Image: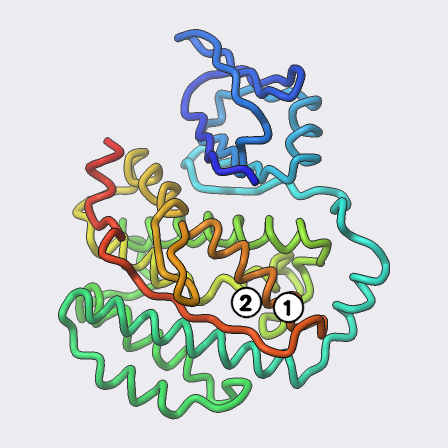
Amino acid sequence: MGWRSVIVTQHAKMSYSAGLMVVQTMDGTSEIPLDDMVLLMVSTTQAVITSALISALVKNNVKVIFVDHAHQPIGEVNGYQSANRDCKVLENQFNWQQQRKDVLWTKIVAAKINNQISVLKCFHKNVECLQNELDQLEVGDETNREAVVARKYFPLLYDDDFSRHNGSAINAALDYGYSILLSETNRIIAGNGYLTELGIHHRNQANHFNLGSDLMEPFRPIIDYWVAGQKFRELTPEVKIGLIDCMNIEILFNGKKEILRNAISRYVTDCLNYLSGDKDETRIEVEFTSEVPNDALNGNV
């Protein structure tokens, strides 16, 4: 399993040679084994990448993300067909039982709200109103407690005037972090041979990543926590690097210490196996450890 996130931030040419990504810059040439990589972030519009390298990265299930001129993620490369995908997997996905989808979505929402409460506790905020909403959660979240909690959670975490709809640096950082989280979730879904378009709750016809949008939810508060622990006025390259490095944060997942990237991999695979009937139960318990860094930004400057 790969572990390395590679971020290209300057004018460069990237090509493929014998299992290696070769990166040529003004400063010299670097070679990175594709087997080590899980993510290539092309964080510049001044880079050139060969088709041979893109093909090799896709075969190795390495997520490739491109940015626009504002350096915001604008798109990603998905394999035309997963090595694990076959008709049986797709038939399974199209026939997932509604009961299992409802049960899993309930667990996902509960885990997300619990993690939002944990984040607020880290910053010594009153969590009573969120706990009350969690207590009202029903199977399938018919009353949409997830949205109700979100409206109360963000002003509590940041400040009373905060809105997810303004153009603040905090929102830019949250959106950037969520996009990295979604990309990693999609990578695991595709690697297991399933379609990212078919969600269990999200059903937006224009969203190619409905399933990823569903499954990433319990981990969003980790991005919220990291952003709340930083002091910045704009989404600088250093902030972006810190957000990408969040994938290496150590957490407790189902009682076991793991880095976030590995926890997501295990969690997504468990959810897919549950939905497909290959297992009867699934756990989603995320806890922060004392090693979750809220000073990670300084460590990346």
The three-letter code of the residue at mark 2 reads Asp
Q: Looking at the image, can residue 65 be seen?
A: no
Q: In which quarter of the image is the N terminus?
A: top right
Q: Is mark 2 on a helix, strand or loop?
A: helix
Q: Nearer the viewer, residue 168 or 264?
A: 264
3D distance between C-alphas at marks 1 and 2: 7 Å
**Which residue corresponds to mark 2?**
214
Query: Residue 5 in the image: x percent, y percent?
Result: 46, 35
**Which residue corresponds to mark 1?**
199
| Residue 243 sits above or below residue 58 on the image | below
| Residue 184 sits above or below residue 217 on the image | above
Sequence-wise, which precedes: disc 1 or disc 2? 1
Q: Residue at x 29, y 82 (%)?
A: 130
Q: Quadrant of residue 94?
A: bottom right
The three-letter code of the residue at mark 1 reads Gly
32 horizontally vs 173: left or right: right
- Tell me if mark 1 has few (under 14), some (14-19) or many (20+) residues whose alpha carbon lies within 10 angstroms of its own: many
Q: In which quarter of the image is residue 276?
A: bottom right
Q: Which residue is drawn at 75% across and 43% down?
A: 80
Q: Is mark 1 on a helix, strand or loop?
A: loop
Q: Quadrant of residue 101?
A: bottom right
- Tell me if mark 2 has few (under 14), some (14-19) or many (20+) residues whose alpha carbon lies within 10 angstroms of its own: many
As drawn, the label of residue 270 is none
Query: Residue 70 in the image: x percent, y percent?
Result: 41, 36
Q: Looking at the image, can residue 112 be seen?
A: yes
170 horizontally vs 4: left or right: left
Q: Nearer the viewer, residue 52 or 286?
A: 286
Q: Which residue is drawn at 66% across and 67% down?
A: 273
Q: In which quarter of the image is the C terminus?
A: top left
| Residue 163 sits above or below residue 244 on the image | below
Q: Do the residues labelled 1 and 2 touch (CB within 8 Å)?
A: yes
| Residue 32 sits above or below residue 77 on the image | above
